[in-house]
């Protein structure tokens, strides 16, 4: 297994445990996107890993959102795999890999972080520590990396409207009720449950798992064109003067720093 920049890898036979470690708050930026490109290429080979478990090394943040100062940079890195500067299409490729992917969520997962866990096949979250949100509407943007596609299919129209347009924070219990995640469970039980599930799945024939994933995706995964449209809308909005002004305003309040604004981002966005 090659070295990664911000993903810490631990192998256990056919299970790969991948911990995201990008201080100070696990922003999604060039390093993480570069690691995802490399990891997807490995998983596409389909010859070693049956299951991947994604977690975070930071107890307060899983992936809180993208680094808004490096959008063009990380999108260009995504193009190395998908041929277009699109995080959305990169996430869709993650959904299509030959491994079953599980997100083990503790800490804040908002915006493209939420869309990352939605791109995974399953999501399990800490009742005490996990917080969810889609923050793009507060900046005049469409969720550009699959959030519209996944959340509408999982929650239904009304709840998807609520989550996406409110740009506020949701607890793990409410996320479970809405269908955002598979289960919310006590933090003390989360690691053991997810590890045991991953090991159980990894004992089953790989080709069967690949076939199951392909058939579920054929029903539940939106087309590449739908992802492309959302990605393009997000990208265009980053050039909008109002969007730029809102980014500038919240950066001045401590956005992207480990502190009150990021810990309570749903509240801060409501005051923009």
Image (cartoon, rainbow, N blue to C red):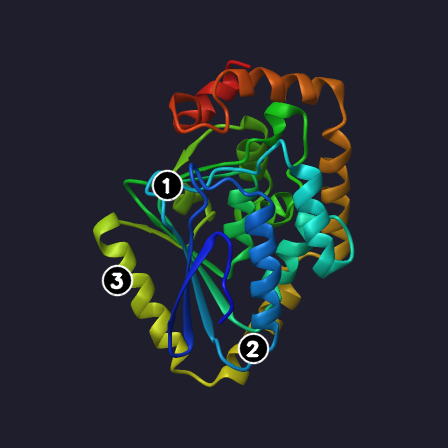
Q: Which residue is mark 3?
A: 192
Q: In terms of image quadrants, where is residue 203? A: bottom left
Q: Position of residue 110 (x, y in %)?
A: 50, 38
The residue shown at (64%, 46%) is 145
Q: CA distance from mark 2 to mark 3?
A: 25 Å
**Residue 107, disc:** 1
Residue 246, image x, y percentages: 63, 18
Residue 229 image offset from top left, x and y in percent? 77, 45
Dot 1 crowding, Cα within 10 Å, few <14, some 14–19, many 20+: many
Give the SS element for disc 1. loop
In the displayed structure image, the side of residue 188 where residue 6 appears, left or right: right
Q: Residues within 10 Å of mark 2 (few under 14, many from 20)?
A: some
Viewer-closest of 270 and 82: 82
Query: Marks 1 and 3, how far apart in space?
Result: 17 Å
45 in relation to 79, above or below? below
Element type at marker 2?
A: helix
Q: Secondary structure at mark 3?
A: helix
Q: Earlier in the sequence, mark 2 or mark 3?
A: 3
Residue contact at pointers 1 and 3, CB within 8 angstroms: no
Q: Is residue 49 left or right of residue 29?
A: left
x, y percent for residue 19: 41, 55
Q: Which residue is mark 2?
A: 210
Indicate which disc, 2 or 1, sits on the residue closer to the N terminus: 1
Who comes first in sequence, dot 1 or dot 3?
1
């Amino acid at each position: 297994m090659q070295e990664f920049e911000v993903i810490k890898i631990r192998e256990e036979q056919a299970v790969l445990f991948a911990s995201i470690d990008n201080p100070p708050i696990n922003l999604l930026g060039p390093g993480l996107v570069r690691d995802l490109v490399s990891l997807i290429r490995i998983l596409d080979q389909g010859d070693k890993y049956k299951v991947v478990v994604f977690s975070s090394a930071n107890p307060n943040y899983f992936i809180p959102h993208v680094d808004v100062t490096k959008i063009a940079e990380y999108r260009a890195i995504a193009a190395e795999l998908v041929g277009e500067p699109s995080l959305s299409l990169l996430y869709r490729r993650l959904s299509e890999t030959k491994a079953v992917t599980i997100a083990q969520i503790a800490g804040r997962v908002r915006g493209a972080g939420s869309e990352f866990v939605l791109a995974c096949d399953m999501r399990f979250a800490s009742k005490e520590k996990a917080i969810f949100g889609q923050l793009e509407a507060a900046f005049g943007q469409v969720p550009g990396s699959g959030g519209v596609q996944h959340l509408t299919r999982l929650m239904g129209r009304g709840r998807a409207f609520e989550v996406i347009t409110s740009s506020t924070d949701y607890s793990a219990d409410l996320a479970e009720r809405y269908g955002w995640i598979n289960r919310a469970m006590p933090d003390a039980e989360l690691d053991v449950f997810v590890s045991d599930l991953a090991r159980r799945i990894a004992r089953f024939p790989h080709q069967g798992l690949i076939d199951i994933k392909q058939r579920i995706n054929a029903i539940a995964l939106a087309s590449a064109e739908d992802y492309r449209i959302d990605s393009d809308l997000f990208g265009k909005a980053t050039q909008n003067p109002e969007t730029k002004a809102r980014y500038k305003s919240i950066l001045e309040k401590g956005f992207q720093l480990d502190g009150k604004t990021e810990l309570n981002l749903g509240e801060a966005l409501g005051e923009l």
